[in-house]
Amino acid sequence: MNNEAIGRSAIGNRVAAACVLATFVSGCLSEVSTSVRETAGPSVEHFRLVRPGVVPIAAQFHQVGHSIVGQLALTNACNTESVQSIKRQEVTDRHTNRGAAIGWLLAGGVVTALGTGLMVASGGADKRVTCGDYSDGDECHSMSGAMLETGLLAALSGLTVAVPAGISLAQKPKIETKDLGEEQISFVTSSNVPCAPPTNLEGIVVAIDLPGNGNWSGRSAADGTVRIEVQPSIPMPEGESVSIRVQSVPSTLASNVVPGAVLAAVTFVKPQALQETKLKQKQAKR
């Protein structure tokens, strides 16, 4: 009964050792690598003021009768910026170390083959049982039994190594991704340029406030010319200087031109002085 228990204990120990070996081999064959992948989105260009608060429009206005006539032009008050969105992901790659797996598979196959050969050869070996010198601790066995036990242990060890290696080779790589968010980068592509193409002057609305006589506005043409018409019945504030402000702008200029910004000022003259100015202009043309 004691011999039977000892035999079962030995078998259990060998099976446990085989499991530990299989776990160790499986752990050695798995590789995990982590990296951060960056994916750049399309670049978007836009205009940005060189200095905040600068009005990127130059203007000149003068009075012509009951009209205020002016010329608008875009100044080199902007930089062109390119903005790009960068998407960042953490990539975890779990895969088999194929070189190691093939090595373990071949080694396990060789050991299994040797063990199988020993088990086959044990059938023709000497079956006489010997017990050593009959000292304490000596075990009784035959040559055939020893070869069978050694072959069985070798075959088990070989399979313990070869099977996990084969399973690992059959597994496909597993790739996991984790979003890390997005970030935006910007860089200047050109400096001190107009804040829009010249044709974007079209649609700019400028206005003046005549004290006690309301607000009067005019819309700019594509070439930047603008005319504010005041009704002839409205008296002009002679001798006074009135600011000309931006009332509204097209969407292409909305980010850089604030409604209410002062473009220029015009000083109203007396009708007699206005006539004299016109006469001088005509004489100068002659």
Image (spheres, rainbow, N blue to C red):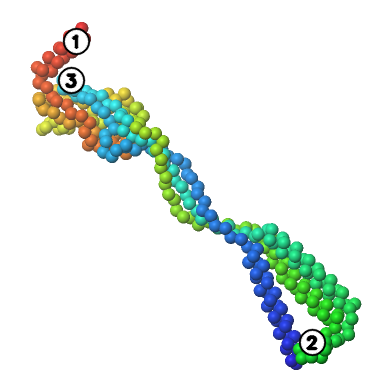
Location of residue 23 in the rendering, given as x and y in whole percent from the top left corner: 65, 70
- Identify which residue is drawn at 51% across, 55% down: 90
- Image quadrant where residue 168 sits: bottom right
- Image quadrant where residue 125 sits: bottom right
Mark 3 residue crowding within 10 angstroms, few (<14) / some (14–19) / many (20+): some
Q: Secondary structure at mark 3?
A: strand
Location of residue 257 in the rendering, given as x and y in whole percent from the top left corner: 28, 36
Location of residue 98 in the rendering, given as x and y in whole percent from the top left corner: 68, 58
Above or below: residue 63 compared with residue 50: above
Q: CA distance from mark 2 to mark 1?
A: 135 Å
Above or below: residue 149 compared with residue 169: below
- Identify which residue is drawn at 11% across, 32% down: 211
Q: Secondary structure at mark 1?
A: helix
User: Which residue was labeled with disc 1?
Assistant: 284
- Image quadrant where residue 230 sits: top left
- Asked whether residue 251 is in view, the answer is no
Q: Furthest residue to the bottom? A: 1
Q: Is residue 256 left or right of residue 129?
A: left
**Residue type for callout 1:** Ala
Label annotation for residue 64: 3
User: Which residue was labeled with disc 2?
Assistant: 139
Q: Is residue 33 left or right of residue 255?
A: right
- Identify which residue is drawn at 17% across, 31% down: 243
